[in-house]
Every structure is written in C-alpha cells, then in structure tokens.
C-alpha cells in the first residue's frame, strides 16, 4: 500500500470514538426503572466535540480509502471517473453491498457535508444527535476496514 495518512485517520477515529463511549459510561441509569440513562452534564461539550472528530475523520478516511481501493481494484481512470460519486456508489464500486451500511453511508454523507459546509441560516427541518451520527460513521468505517482485512 502506498504511503498514506489513512492509518492515522483510523487511529484518530478510534480514539475519539473510545472517548465518546467513556463519556457515555458516566451517564447514570434512570431511577424510575425505565430504559435509558440520565445524561451527565457536559459543560465543555466533550462528547459533541469527539463526535464531530469521528464524523470529520471518518469522511477523510473514506475518501483516502476509496482513492486507494478504486485504483487498486480498477484503475486511476476509474477513480477519476467516479471521484464525484456518492459514498454509497463508491462503496458499491469497491464491492461493499451490505444494505445497512449502504443506507448509513447515504445519511453519513449528508451529515458530514452539513458539518463541513455548515450553513447556519438554513433550517433543514431535522435534528441530529452527534453521538448517533458518530456511531453510524464508526460502523461504516469498521465494516469497510474489516471487509478489506484491515488494510486501511
């Protein structure tokens, strides 16, 4: 594999996701016996920040991995022809076909684009939970890296 930051991106994703899980462990079960937890006050928004790191670096990891894998499987020309395609289309191109991952990739790409290209005055009429979006991103990365024997 050529020199790439893809391994460093994955390390950053893993560390941030681990931090999210640690912060979630600090939440306490509801005292009324119902499902769920009471979220511990997070004045520095550490969970949100770690979730944003996962989403941003998952996008960077995917783009770097797509570049490497499409060239490896197909060609440089095929990569160029497909470079502007959606994450879902690129996943399919490299052989990922799990419907749940492809569906998460559609939502993840939208979330990543909304975060990176924030338009504060546009209301899309939806509320996203950063930690949930980070979990989806992490699941995609884990699935893809696992499918390719942890090459990236």
Image (tube, grey):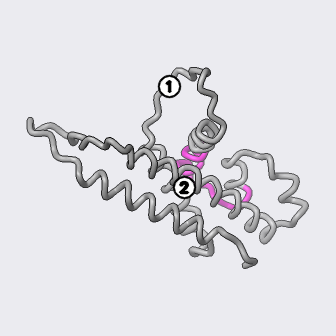
Q: Which residue is mark 1?
A: 126
Q: Which quadrant is home to the C terminus?
A: bottom right
Q: Residue at x 80, y 47 (%)?
A: 84
Asked if residue 62 lies left or right of residue 142, the reply is right
Q: Residue at x 39, y 61 (%)?
A: 18
- Tell which of 90 and 4 is nearer to you: 4
Q: Which numbered disc, 2 or 1, marks the residue that appears first in the sequence? A: 1
Residue, far left: 32
- Residue 123 inside the magenta-drawn segment: no
| Alpha carbons under labels 2 and 1: distance apart | 22 Å
Callout 1 secondary element: loop
Q: Which quadrant is home to the N terminus?
A: bottom right
Callout 2 secondary element: helix
- Tell which of 63 and 22 is nearer to you: 22
Give the magenta part as a residue range: 93-106
Residue 115, position as x, y percentages in the image: 59, 39
How busy is the neighbourhood of tag 1: few (under 14 within 10 Å), some, or many (20 plus)?
Answer: few
Q: Residue at x 46, y 28 (%)?
A: 127
Asked if residue 64 lies left or right of residue 9, the reply is right
Circle on res. 42:
none
How busy is the neighbourhood of tag 2: few (under 14 within 10 Å), some, or many (20 plus)?
Answer: many
Cβ–Cβ under 8 Å for marks 2 and 1? no
Asked if residue 137 lies left or right of residue 86, the reply is left
User: Does the magenta stretch mainly form a helix, a strand or a loop?
Assistant: helix
Q: Which residue is mark 2?
A: 140
Which image quarter: residue 21?
A: bottom left
Residue 151, position as x, y percentages in the image: 62, 75
């Amino acid at each position: 594999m050529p020199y790439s930051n893809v391994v460093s991106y994955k390390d950053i994703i893993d560390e941030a996701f681990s931090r999210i899980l640690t912060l979630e462990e600090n939440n306490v079960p509801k005292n009324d016996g119902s499902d769920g937890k009471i979220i511990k006050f997070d004045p520095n928004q550490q969970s949100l920040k770690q979730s944003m790191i996962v989403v941003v670096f998952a996008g960077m990891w995917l783009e770097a991995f797509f570049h490497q894998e499409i060239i490896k499987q197909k060609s440089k020309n095929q990569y160029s022809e497909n470079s502007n395609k959606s994450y879902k289309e690129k996943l399919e191109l490299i052989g990922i076909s799990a419907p749940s991952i492809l569906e998460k990739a559609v939502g993840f790409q939208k979330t990543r684009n909304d975060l990176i290209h924030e338009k504060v005055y546009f209301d899309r009429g939806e509320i996203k939970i950063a930690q949930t979006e980070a979990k989806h991103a992490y699941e995609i990365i884990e699935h893809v890296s696992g499918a390719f024997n942890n090459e990236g």
